[in-house]
Each structure stands twice: as C-alpha cells, then as structure tokens.
Image: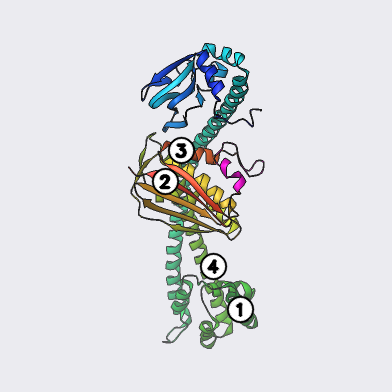
Amino acid sequence: MNAANAPMFPKLTAYQIQCAIDAGEKLDLKDGDVIFREGVGRADFYVILEGKIKVVRETPGGQTVLVVHEPGEFTGTTDLLTGENATATGYALGPTRVARVRAEKFNELILSCPEMRGLLLPALTSRRTTEYAIETQQQKLAALGKMSAGLAHELNNPAAAAGRSAHTLTCSLTAIEDIVCDLLNTVITPGREEGIPLTTLCEMARRTPEEIDPLTRNEREDELCEWLGNLGLKQPWEAAGSLVGAGVSRKELEPLLERSGPKLALKLIAWLANDIDMRVGCRDLAESTKRMSEIVKAMKEYSHMDQAGAKSPTDLNKSLDTTMTVLKHRVRPKNISVRKEYGTLPLVSAFGGALNQVWTNLLNNAIDAAPPDGHLVIRTSVEGNDALVEITDDGPGIPPEIRARIFEPFFTTKGVGEGTGLGLDISHRIIRDHGGSIRFDSVPGRTTFSVRLPIH
C-alpha cells in the first residue's frame, strides 16, 4: 500500500495494538487531560484503547478540530516522522484509556513490528501531505482575503463617484430638456396658441424602458423603421430601436407631421431618439455602479466577517446572500435559475468568514453540477435547536459508488486543474468545529447538501 492510497485514520488490529502496549505503557486519562500540546515538544505515539481523543489546531479564527479518534485508532501528530514540535493539541474526551509509546521509542516499535510499520508509515505520510495541502489552502485564502479587502477599498471610491455622476447627469439632462422646450416653443410658435407638443416629447423620453418579448419588439421596430425610412430619416433602424424601447409608437409620432411638416418632424424625432439614448445610458451607468457597489460590499463582508478572530452573532440568510453575490458571475453563463426560500432565523454564533467558505464550496459544486438552464434552491429553516441550510441542484446526482468518499480530502470528480478535492473536506471540518453537521441526499435530478448549526 502506498501513501497515496493509504487511509489516514486506519483501525489497528488486535496484534498491532498489543505491539504498542508491549512497547509502551497504559495510561488512564480524565476528561480534558492533554496528551500533547501544539508547539511544545515532540508528541508521543498513542493508541486509543477506550474513550476518545480530540485533536485540535490553533487558527486565527480560534481552534479548528482536526479529528476525534475512536478506540482502535492511533494519534501522535505527524511530527513523529519529522522530529519537530507537536503540530496540534490532543486531549481526552471523557474518561479514556490509551497505550503510550514514548517518541524516542517510536522507531523501535516500527522496526520490531513489521505489521505496524506497514500501516503507520503510509498513514502518517498521508496525514502529513494533507496537512501541508490544507495549510497551503488556508494561506491562499488568507492572502485572497487581504487582496479582496484592498481591491474593495480601491473600487469603492470610483464606483461611488460614478454613481453620483450618473445621478447628476440625469438631473442635468432633465433641466436642459426643460430649457430647450421653452426656447423651441418661443421660436416655433410665436404668437400662436397651438404648437408642437415638445413637453410631450420630453415625457416620452423620460419613460421607464418597456419590457416586451423579443418577437413583439422586432415587429414594432420593423414597422417603425419602415415608416421613418419612408419619411427620409437617416439610419432609421437606430432611431426605431430607441423609440420602441421607450414604448413610443408611430401613432404618437404622427401628430408631429400634421403640426410641423415632415422636415421639422424628422428633426424632432431624431432629437427624441437621442434624448432616449442618453437617458438609457444614464440608467445603465447608474445600474452598473450600483452593481459594482453591491459587489464591493459583498467582498468586504465575505473577507472580514470574522476579522475579530472570534465567533460573533451571524445572520445566515445574509451570509448566503453575500456569497451568492460573489458567485453571480458563475451562474450567468449557464443561465441557472436561483430560488431563495429563506425562513426567519435567529442569529447564530459563528465564524462568519469560515461559514462563507462553506457556502462557497457547496454553491460552487451545485453550480458545476446543474445543467444549462438548470435550477438551484437555497433554503433555510429552524428545526428544533438547529438552524438548517439546504442547497439543492438538479444535476445528475452523485453516483452510489463514490458517495462514501465525498468528504475525503483530495477526492474529486472534476478534471485536472478544475478542483483540489479539499472543498468538502474543509467544509466538513468547519461545520464540525461549529458543533454542527453536514450531510447529503442524492438521486438523479436532485442533490441536496444539508448543514445544521446549533442556534445556542
């Protein structure tokens, strides 16, 4: 068995356990007794005989639970191979009995017991490889958080300035229209009560763009384009597109011909079409800057919700919205419909940034699994003392033969370079560290990942 295929947490046989007992000593531990401490000396080798051993590591956000060892498993951190200080802290969960082999006698154990050697070395190597990969991933995420915070700060000011400019431009355009109307009325209708309804044209330009289906829009544009072309308007297709978009019809424009004649009417229609285009540009600019501001806000929340390094009251619905905003660019190319069914949830004590990482991993996987024009459902509710988050996609489902390996580190069904196989493993660890659970149900056409988090 090589390290790549070795299970990281194998069960020892009765013979292997006896080898450890013969090479060391039995110890009875009380709840909370520490058997090795991160950064303090080299850890000894332990085989759990009764009870449980919990192994944790200090992180900027608090303690991260690495594993809880059951009877028949062994622990001692991977420094047994390197001779370095302990890389984690292990302590007893409840009354526990272990067999301890001193670090300096570990080599003697694996030399004297070939069965132990064949099991321990691949397993410890596999654990060490996983630790390095997770540490690298955490460093990358930390660097990404700092970078996104810096980008958010740099983008926020120009986005806000552009938004203010769009608003100012719209107001100025309205003021200019009013002035032009007064001037034209004075020039065109001196001493006459009747005249060209310029204020009506301005009202047309200020309309909210009409939502119509593409087929109807094309028919209206073709009809208006032909009419304008017959009148002699240059590039009538451009003006027709603008006018139809604002809901302006031929019926509304025909009175211009009756009251001013074709030559002046064409100039007024061209003026109206350009006025509409400018207003559409202002609206697009305002909408774009609003979108930029939303993304900047989401990036800040995504990167800094856990900046204090401690758990804080977290709104799960808002946390999911923040993550979905960051991932919108992945939804659009596949035209995936996202439906949110949020319940009323109390605030949950959590590391907000860590939960964002969980949602990112689960939503990314759901987006990858969903077919083009597929569907994604994000549902939240309260069940008993838990907050429940469910993410469902309508992809092909998870084949039965790989379901047992879904949460294994480095296991991925994606192509080379598309996935590390660490997303679900990291998510599982984060949720477990919060005292919660994560599971999935999958059939063809429907896969749901469910995350439970204790409310109190």
C-alpha gap between disc 3 and disc 2: 12 Å
Dot 3 or dot 2: first in sequence order is 3
Q: Position of residue 211 (x, y in %)?
A: 51, 71
Q: Which residue is mark 2?
A: 452
Q: Which residue is mark 4?
A: 277
Q: Which mark is residue 430?
A: 3
Q: In this orientation, which residue lies closer to the viewer: 5 or 361?
A: 5
Q: In this orientation, which residue lies closer to the viewer: 375 or 106?
A: 106
Q: Callout 3: few (<14), some (14-19), or many (20+) C-alpha neighbours within 10 Å?
A: many
Question: In the image, is residue 394 above or below residue 94?
Answer: below
Q: Which residue is mark 1?
A: 219
Looking at the image, can residue 276 be seen? yes
Single out the residue that lies furthest toward the bottom: 258
Q: Callout 2: few (<14), some (14-19), or many (20+) C-alpha neighbours within 10 Å?
A: many
Magenta region? 400-418
Q: Callout 4: few (<14), some (14-19), or many (20+) C-alpha neighbours within 10 Å?
A: many
